[in-house]
Amino acid sequence: MEQQKLPNATLIMVFGIISIVTCCCYGVIGLIFGIIALILANKALKLYAENPEIYEGVQTVKTGRILAIIGLVLNVLAIAYMIWAISFFGWETLQDPQKMQEILEQYQ
């Protein structure tokens, strides 16, 4: 019997990579891709656990899952940093480069 690929194995890997790469986009975009990749990976791993002899490509799913977890952590850190920066400096200061420069010079 020929083995078939796990569904969405490549998509899980791609979404895991996208979640890491887009962590610099204020954390929101990467967070969405990371959550989707994690959900799809968990479904694929459950499917593999039921019939491991039928499916191949479990390593791709596991790698994509790990990348999604790393991406989620990085995106949560990016969101936490943005919340800290807004609460510490204020939204108006972050929008004005001159004002931001003045505040940063005070802390040096």
Image (cartoon, rainbow, N blue to C red):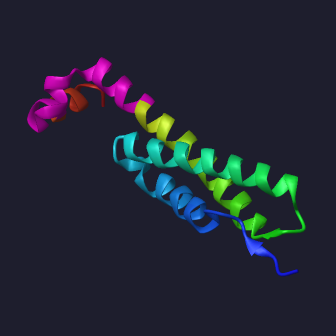
Image quadrant where residue 57 sits: bottom right
> Left or right of 78: which side holds 63?
right
The image shows residue 82 at horizontal and vertical percentages of 35, 31
Please identify the quadrant where the C terminus is shown: top left
Asked if the magenta segment contains residue 88, the reply would be yes
The image shows residue 28 at horizontal and vertical percentages of 38, 40
Please identify the quadrant where the N terminus is shown: bottom right
> Left or right of 52: which side holds 90?
left
The residue lying at 59 percent from left, 63 percent from top is: 13
| Vertical side of 42 occupied by 18: above or below | below
Please tell me which residue lies in front, 95 or 71: 71
Please tell me which residue lies in front, 17 or 45: 45
> Left or right of 56: which side holds 20?
left
> Left or right of 73: which side holds 90?
left
Please identify the residue farthest to the bottom as the structure is shown: 2
Magenta span of residues: 80-100
The image shows residue 45 at horizontal and vertical percentages of 76, 53
Please tell me which residue lies in front, 6 or 11: 6
| Vertical side of 40 occupied by 4: above or below | below
Give the prevailing secondary structure in the magenta stretch: helix
Please identify the residue farthest to the front as the structure is shown: 1
Image quadrant where residue 44 sits: bottom right
The residue lying at 32 percent from left, 27 percent from top is: 85
